[in-house]
Image: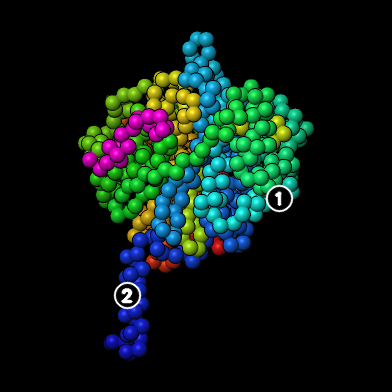
């Protein structure tokens, strides 16, 4: 039966509107809701406070970054760096702010090698030499000046409050402090704040950071440039040199962010927007998805599906090791690596019944990467987005605090290849493209990513060093399979990074049948007892208008929709 004319008219309008709305590029859609997922509930709340005050996603990203530096310094901090992948709704602009650390001018290729020509154990991790010139404050400054709408002082206010008033020690934080106890005990100021009677503080102990609060207040008053050319920079240079480092006033004054065009790919109707070099993330992600686009994964049995995902990860990571570094220093065949024809060639080397040992892939000389970092995802009600992955590299960076500032120094220099042929702490290998040079950015695996599909949008990223890109790949496949944000962050994970030639898996990631089938194909399997990653995901379903935010249950973060 036809509806009555009045309703028929409304129906025609409704259908026409729905068709037009569905055909609109994502940039022109408006979610009407905002969402934030970050590694700490207080950082998520700091972002929310800024949205409430009329800030956009870019303002919220600054507030979340500053709050994370206070309540989650295991993952990131002002004396670190990171990448902010942005989408501006008003003009559809996608861009990545590269706020990656740079090697100081006095750095040199062999600076971490001892008299025997081998890396000195720990030097690129636990000393002030391990610190690259920090980029995070410059990234925040650029967000505020070019993309945000609220004043810096307002954006830093939640972090300043948290530094003054303190926040409680959680199980994760307690475990990490325990891990760093000896390093902290050697520094009086650090021990006073982070230890109690020489040990990790009991759960619930309130951690207050008055020096960090003062540093943040100085930056709020004088601007973030003060970190590079002002009172804070003078403190940093003097403090780093006192700790044995090589930072100079000129290094800090010369630091600039770079706006870089993201890596863009296509996978089964979805648009992939991700991090370009000096991150390897976007290239490895798009290359792996290009390889997978030759198969109808949904039609394959689960073991074969996982075999192909692993085969694509392995090939992507192999190319990372061979080709990638800082684009301002090395020529890279980026267009070729993310070209579908290249992926077709890689597919030709994949057999469905057998794993190809990594040693049979064209070889490389052996580079570097760390397990701790943090990610947050923000969507505002207008459709602006930020995928921010920021880092000090390993847990609490070097563990050294620059005297008087409350700032933990990064140990990002370990992300360079210290010596060809020597894998780093994360067993990643690389070559000359990622060797140390003054002013060069070290290669990263951080993979802040947007996925735009007919189903909707996903904003995603994670810490986890060499594991990051594989996690974003699995999250992408899960999103395109229709999984919810909560399901995506919780799903058990598999990983292969080319070398070592081992398929790692979390408990429950493989069934006994899959284990048998993959073993028969020739894989060496290793179950991880602890799992990895801390994925932060925001999704927006176009058809229902539903927005979701989810934080990885492996961590202690929080996703909220407002
Ligand atoms: N430090 C972790 C990364 O950049 O990949």
User: Does residue 496 lie above or below 38 as drawn?
Assistant: above
Report the side of 72 relative to 416 (left or right): right
Residue 417 shows up from this direction: yes
Mark 2 and mark 1 lie on one chain; the one further toward the N terminus is: 2
> Does 361 lie within the magenta span?
no
Residue that appears at 31% across and 50% down = 267
**Circle on res. 16:** 2
**Mark 2–mark 1 distance (CA, rounded to whole Å):** 50 Å
Residue that appears at 29% across and 48% down = 297
Report the side of 273 relative to 349 (left or right): right
Identify the secondary structure beneath mark 2.
helix
Q: Which residue is mark 1?
A: 161
What's the image's color scheme? rainbow
Q: What secondary structure predominates along the stretch shown in magenta?
A: loop
Residue 74 position, x and y percent, is 60, 38
Report the side of 558 relative to 358 (left or right): right
Residue 242 position, x and y percent, is 68, 24
- Front residue of 384/300: it is 384
**Residue 328, quarter of the rendered image:** top left
**Residue 309, quarter of the rendered image:** top left
**Residue 350, quarter of the rendered image:** top left
């Amino acid at each position: 039966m036809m509806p009555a004319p009045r309703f028929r008219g409304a129906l025609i309008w409704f259908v026409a509107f729905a068709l037009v709305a569905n055909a609109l590029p994502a940039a022109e859609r408006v979610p009407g809701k905002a969402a934030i997922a970050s590694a700490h509930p207080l950082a998520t709340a700091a972002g929310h406070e800024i949205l409430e005050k009329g800030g956009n996603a870019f303002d919220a990203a600054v507030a979340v970054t500053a709050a994370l530096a206070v309540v989650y310094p295991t993952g990131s901090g002002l004396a670190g760096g990171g990448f902010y992948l942005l989408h501006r709704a008003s003009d559809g602009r996608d861009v990545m702010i590269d706020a990656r650390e740079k090697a100081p001018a006095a750095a040199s290729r062999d600076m971490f090698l001892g008299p025997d020509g081998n890396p000195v154990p720990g030097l690129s991790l636990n000393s002030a030499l391990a610190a690259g010139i920090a980029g995070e404050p410059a990234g925040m400054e650029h967000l505020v000046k070019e993309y945000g709408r609220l004043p810096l002082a307002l954006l830093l206010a939640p972090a300043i409050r948290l530094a003054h008033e303190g926040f409680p020690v959680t199980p994760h934080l307690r475990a990490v402090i325990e891990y760093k106890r000896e390093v902290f005990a050697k520094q009086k100021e650090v021990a006073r704040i982070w230890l109690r009677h020489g040990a990790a503080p009991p759960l619930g102990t309130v951690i207050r950071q008055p020096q960090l609060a003062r540093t943040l207040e100085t930056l709020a008053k004088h601007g973030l440039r003060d970190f590079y050319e002002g009172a804070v920079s003078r403190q940093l240079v003097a403090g780093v040199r006192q700790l044995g480092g090589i930072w100079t006033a000129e290094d800090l004054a010369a630091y600039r962010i770079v706006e870089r065009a993201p890596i863009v790919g296509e996978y089964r109707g979805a648009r992939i927007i991700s991090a370009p070099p000096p991150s390897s993330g976007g290239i490895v992600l798009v290359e792996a998805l290009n390889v997978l686009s030759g198969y109808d994964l949904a039609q394959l049995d689960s073991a074969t599906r996982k075999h192909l995902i692993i085969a694509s990860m392995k090939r992507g990571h192999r190319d990372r090791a061979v080709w990638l570094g800082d684009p301002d220093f090395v020529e890279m065949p980026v267009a070729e690596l993310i070209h579908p024809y290249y992926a077709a060639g890689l597919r030709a080397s994949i057999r469905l019944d057998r794993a190809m040992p990594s040693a049979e892939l064209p070889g490389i000389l052996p580079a570097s990467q760390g397990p701790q970092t943090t990610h947050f995802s923000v969507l505002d009600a207008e459709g602006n987005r930020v995928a921010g992955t920021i880092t000090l590299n390993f847990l609490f960076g070097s563990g050294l605090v620059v005297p008087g500032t409350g700032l933990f120094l990064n140990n990002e220099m370990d992300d360079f290849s210290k010596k060809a042929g020597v894998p780093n702490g994360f067993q990643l290998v690389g070559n000359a493209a990622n060797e140390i040079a003054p002013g060069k950015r070290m290669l990263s695996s951080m993979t802040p990513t947007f996925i735009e599909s007919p189903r909707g949008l996903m904003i995603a990223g994670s810490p986890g060093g060499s594991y990051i890109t594989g996690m974003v790949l699995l999250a992408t496949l899960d999103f395109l399979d229709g999984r919810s944000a909560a399901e995506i962050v919780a799903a058990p994970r598999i990983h292969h990074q080319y070398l070592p030639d081992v398929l790692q898996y979390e408990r429950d990631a493989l069934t006994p049948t899959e284990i048998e089938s993959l073993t028969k194909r020739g894989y060496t399997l290793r179950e991880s007892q602890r799992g990895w990653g801390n994925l932060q995901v925001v999704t927006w379903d176009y058809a229902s208008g539903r927005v979701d935010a989810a934080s990885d249950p492996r961590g202690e973060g929080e996703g909220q929709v407002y």
